[in-house]
Amino acid sequence: MCIRDRVYTSFPAELATAQTDSNYVKRVKLMYGEILQTLEGEDCGGVKSITSETGVINLCNANVNSQSHTIWGNSSGFIAPRTGLMLHERPTRWNLLHGAKDYVWFLGVGQIVLSYWNGAAQLGTNQVFSLTGANTAKYVCLDYSLYGISTPPTHMNLFYSDGVVETTISADYCSCQEQNKYLGILFLEPRGGRSMLSTRKPLTIDIERTGTEIYKPFDNYQTQHKTGGRSIIIPKGTRKLTFETEFV
């Protein structure tokens, strides 16, 4: 059975509550054994014998290397005191557009707290998300309009705790004058969370079109409108952007 199409990061919904991503992590076990092969006779058949199986393991939609694999724990889960893991590697401060649909993904047990500010004045109340389920991934939408905030904030603070790390990172909202200078791109991070990246205006925009070209001979027997020539069927267009951004 192929599991590539069964483990992936879901495309998020814009909701004010933490949502479970049931596709990000799957719990599986491997069953294995031997095939008894006979070489006698015309039919070289074999008998499959499944004799063993592994314990249940978690498969996550993440790209892990030799430097980062230890924070994921082992086959039993996270290693205490860690209880969860933020599935992003953001800078301590980044730019965000008003109206941008940004998200944070979290695996395991922990807490996320969102607060929105206009200068030194807090807008609304803290949005607290207590995340449970050691083997589940959750995501939270950062759009302030979901939490009853109508005044555009100047910045947002995001606190999270995973049993080891307790830290706050921040997003600065672009001013109205700068809003049209940026573009938001939702992309997949190495740990498997989806993030909104604010970039400057595209440097170039190209559209590549592909399809199947067919040629139809002209019908000289048509008395009024003769049809024929080259045409493209099943056309497909791909937009390619080049842009700049920077992290502090």
Image (cartoon, rainbow, N blue to C red):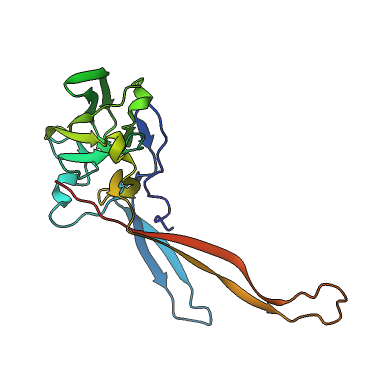
Q: Quadrant of the N terminus?
A: bottom left
**Residue 175: % across, % down:** 27, 35
> How many numbered marks does the figure carry?
0
Name the residue rendered at 43%, 64% in the picture.
Answer: 48
Res. 130 visible in picture: yes
Rendered location of residue 21, percent (x, y) = 37, 38
* Rendered residue at 14%/49% (across/down): 70
Left/right of residue 218 with respect to residue 174 in the rendered view: right
Residue at coordinates 42% horizontally, 58% vertically from top-left? 2
Q: Is residue 120 left or right of residue 124?
A: left
Q: Nearer the viewer, residue 238 or 3?
A: 238
Question: On the rendered structure, is 201 left or right of 69?
Answer: right
Taking the view exactly as shown, the residue that stands out farthest to the front is 177
Q: Quadrant of residue 56?
A: top left
Q: Is residue 193 visible?
A: no
Image quadrant of residue 19? top left
Q: Quadrant of residue 224?
A: bottom right
The image shows residue 28 at horizontal and vertical percentages of 35, 48
Decide: is 42 above or below 100. below
Relative horizontal placement of residue 206, taking residue 77 as reference (left or right): right
Residue 137: image x %, image y %? 31, 38
